[in-house]
Image (spheres, rainbow, N blue to C red):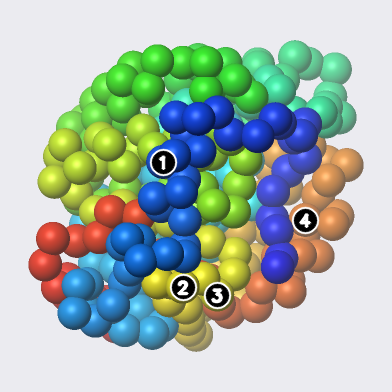
Amino acid sequence: MITTAFRYPARPGAEPLFAGWLAVHAPVGGDVPTATSARSGQAEGRLPRADRVLAVTAHPGQESAELGALLYTFGLAGAQVALLSLTRGEASELNSTIEPLESVRPWELRVAARLLGISSVAVADYPDGRLSSCEPGTLTDRVGRAITDHAADLVVVTDPAESGLDDAVVAMAACAAAKQAGLPTVARTVSAVRGGWQLDLGDQAARTRAVQRSAVAAHASQSSALGGLTFRLRLLGRNEWLRWLVPPPAPQPLLN
C-alpha cells in the first residue's frame, strides 16, 4: 500500500461512535455500499459525472497529497471544484518555517488550490487532531452549508478506512450532510479495495501528477516530508482508486 500523507502524530483507537461508523463503511463485509454496475453503473477507469464538486478534508495538505490528482482531473473534465478544510492544520509534527502552523498552512493551502484549479477554498477553525471532540452535528451542518453554498452535486473525501481518526470524523460528517442533500459521496482510497474501482488518468496522467507534485511542494512548512512524499506520488503512475461511501441513488452516467 502506497500512502501519500503528511506526518501527523499517532492517535488512539477510534472512539466508539466513529468505530461503529467505520465498521459499516469499511471496504469489507456484506452491508457495505459497493460500486457494482447494478447500483452505480460504474465502469473501470471512469470518473463519476459531476458539475460541481465539493472536497472536504481534515487539514491542509490532503487536498494535494491525497486528493490532488483526482481534483485536478475533475477540473480537466469541466467540473467546478470547491474545497473545505475543517481545520487549519496546526497539529502537524512538522514546521520548516518560523511562522505558527495555524497561520501559514491555510496560506499554503490556497497556493496549492490555485495550482490544482480549485475555484473556492474555505478553512474552518475546528481543532486539528481533535475533530472527534467536536459535536458531530456541528460538523455535519458546516459541510451542509458548503454543499449549499457551492450547489455541489458530488462530495469527495479521503477514505476513512485508510486514514486516521480525524479523517473518519470528516467522512462521517460529509456522508451525513451528503445524505441530507441527496448527494453521493466518493472516497479516494490507496489500494484495490472491495467495492472500489480503478480510475485511469489517461493521456493527462503525466501532466496531472506534475501538477499534483507542484501543489504538494506549495506546503513549504512540511518540506522535510516532501522528498519521500514526491517519490511515493511517482510510484502511483496513472492510476487512482475510488469507492462510494454514499452511492448514487440510481445508475449514474459516466465521463469517458
Q: Nearer the viewer, mark 1 or mark 3?
A: 1
Q: CB atoms at circles 4 and 3 under 8 Å apart? A: no
**Three-letter code, disc 1:** Trp
Name the quadrant containing residue 179: top left
User: Mark 1 = which residue?
Assistant: 21
> Disc 2 vs disc 4: which is toward the camera?
2
Q: Kindly check if marks 3 and 2 are in contact, taking CB atoms under 8 A apart as contact.
A: no
Q: Quadrant of residue 232?
A: bottom right
Q: Choose between 205 and 253: the one closer to the eye.
A: 253
Q: CA distance from mark 4 to mark 1?
A: 29 Å
Residue 83, horizontal then vertical, whole percent = 41, 39
Q: Which mark is residue 229?
A: 4
Work out whether mark 4 precedes mark 3 in sequence or the reverse, and give the earlier one. Answer: 3
User: Of discs 4 and 3, which sits in the foreground?
Assistant: 3
The residue wearing badge 2 is 194
Determine the secondary structure under disc 1.
Answer: helix
Q: Residues within 10 Å of mark 1 (few under 14, many from 20)?
A: some
* Residue matched to label 3: 192
Q: Quadrant of the C terminus?
A: bottom left
Residue at position x 77%, y 31% in the image? 9
Q: Give the residue type that dot 4 points to.
A: Leu
* Within-10-Å neighbours for mark 4: few <14, some 14–19, many 20+: many
Q: From the image, which quarter does the N terminus lie in?
A: bottom right
Front-most of 92 and 129? 129
Taking 127 as reference, is 83 left or right? left
Between the C-alphas of marks 2 and 1, the distance is 17 Å
Residue at mark 3 to residue at mark 2: CA–CA distance: 7 Å
Q: Mark 2 or mark 1, which has the lower sequence index?
A: 1
User: Circle 4 — which element?
Assistant: helix
Residue 213, image quadrant: bottom right
Quick check: 26 above or below 104? below
Label disc, if present, on residue 12 of the rendered structure: none
